Amino acid sequence: MRVLSKEDRVDERVDDAVSALAEFAEIAHGSMDPVWILNPQNRKILGRKDFPLADYKALGLSKDGELRENIILVDSFKGNIGNLQGYTALRMSQTATRLRGSRSTSGIIKPQLILAFSGTSNIIHGVYNLMTVPVQYQPASNTESHHDWRVHDGFQRVYQSIRDPAIRALYLAIKKMEETHKGEWDLVITGHSLGTAVASLFLLDLMRSEDALDEPGTSSAADTEMPILPSSTKVTIAKFGPPRVVNPGLVVEYHKQVQQFRRRRGDDALIDWAIIGHMDGVPAVPPMKFGYAHLCRKPFYLYHGKLYRIQEGEHEHSLFTVDDVSSPPLHPKGGHNYYGARDMERLQRRMKALMVDVMAEGTNSYQGQPAQAGASWNSAASSRGVGGTSNIRAPGSQQNDLLWVRAYLEREKEEECAWATRPPETGRSHWGLLRSILPIMRFS
């Protein structure tokens, strides 16, 4: 296995684009409410200095305090297994430098329709993660399977429980995009951890449904569950910390569909980004000995906030040595929750602290939702004082702003201190124990 070096670093534009998409995957997590987060009024507060989205380039604020990007939340949805969460949003403007294929024929940067799936967020998801017996692949109703195509039992069950809600949400998002924007647009499917498995199976169904039609790219046919995308629409799938999902036989079918999709729409019609984090044990499971293989043949390796290209033929490895002194240690210990050069668990902890202070009384502070889905900060906080103090309301005047920030930061400090003093043997995530066995599984 080759040592990765500075010569393997990806283009800075790719790095920026991947990091931005990680933000959308991050807020899909089941402990957060993307409807509430993406409310423009709430984003203007969440993006302030010292607040959870302060350093987020896509979701945060510009230097003048305005929203960096115009993002429209369309819908959120849940599956029947463990209430796995997903959402759709329209990314109408982008701050990051985009890549070839992201511009329309007129040279204008195209909007993106975001379809994001949550990763593992509760114990029920963890149970299904452990259902590793390969079973027969069950595709969308208008396509056929093959006896050699096998898929992770638990992942397929979770995907099937959320497929119909995701399809309905995608139809609604396409309609909203066409009402909002008359030009070309692209589709992004993204997720973290378990969400990457769901995203991969969704994309496979999407490609195979289109391939089953005689004239794809024009209109939705009655014999397909999946919407048929406009012929100018390009697709990016961005997977952060992906486990293995299917067997080698289904990998072959996946790449056949990718080639067909590109033949119909152009060589850059589908971009497959799989990002493997340093010391992340999840991409090492299930082991190849169980009959599994990764879908992406040219993944990226995330090391200290920088992306490196993994050469084809080494895509089944999940741990690499990086010889690049230009990358200072950002998250030295690595792990499953450091994608986008951020501590994803810290965002979950900060949002927990925030929602305890802001959310209406009678809701569950961590897993619950605002009193009204999509409600603004002011309406969510108006039913009680911030931090339980009746004379402190949602931010408005400068004086109230300062009082509110102080109350919030005090609460957040308590959360951070409690986290920092956890016993060392306590795992940092559902996958924390995998770190100890990663060296054993690196060649599995």
Image (spheres, rainbow, N blue to C red):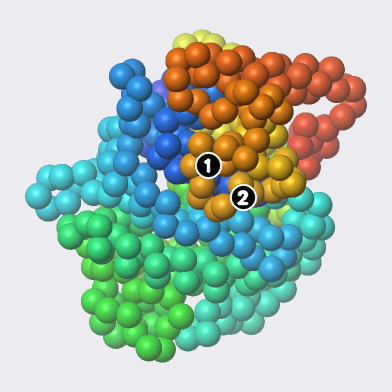
**Residue furthest bottom as drawn:** 223
In percent of width and height, residue 262 lies at: 31, 63
Circle 1 is placed at which residue position?
Answer: 379
Check disc 1 and give the amino acid type: Ser
Q: Is residue 57 left or right of residue 425?
A: left
| Residue 224, quarter of picture | bottom left
Q: Is residue 385 above or below residue 227?
A: above
Q: Is 236 drawn above or below residue 60 in the view shown?
A: below
Residue that appears at 72% across and 73% down: 135
Observer-nearest residue: 352 or 221?
Answer: 352
CB within 8 Å, label 1 to label 2 = yes
Q: Residue under circle 2? A: 371
Q: Residue 52 appears at what percent x and percent y?
A: 55, 27
Secondary structure type for disc 1: helix
Residue 431 spot, x, y in % from top left: 77, 41
Question: Taking the image as drawn, is residue 418 in sight?
Answer: yes
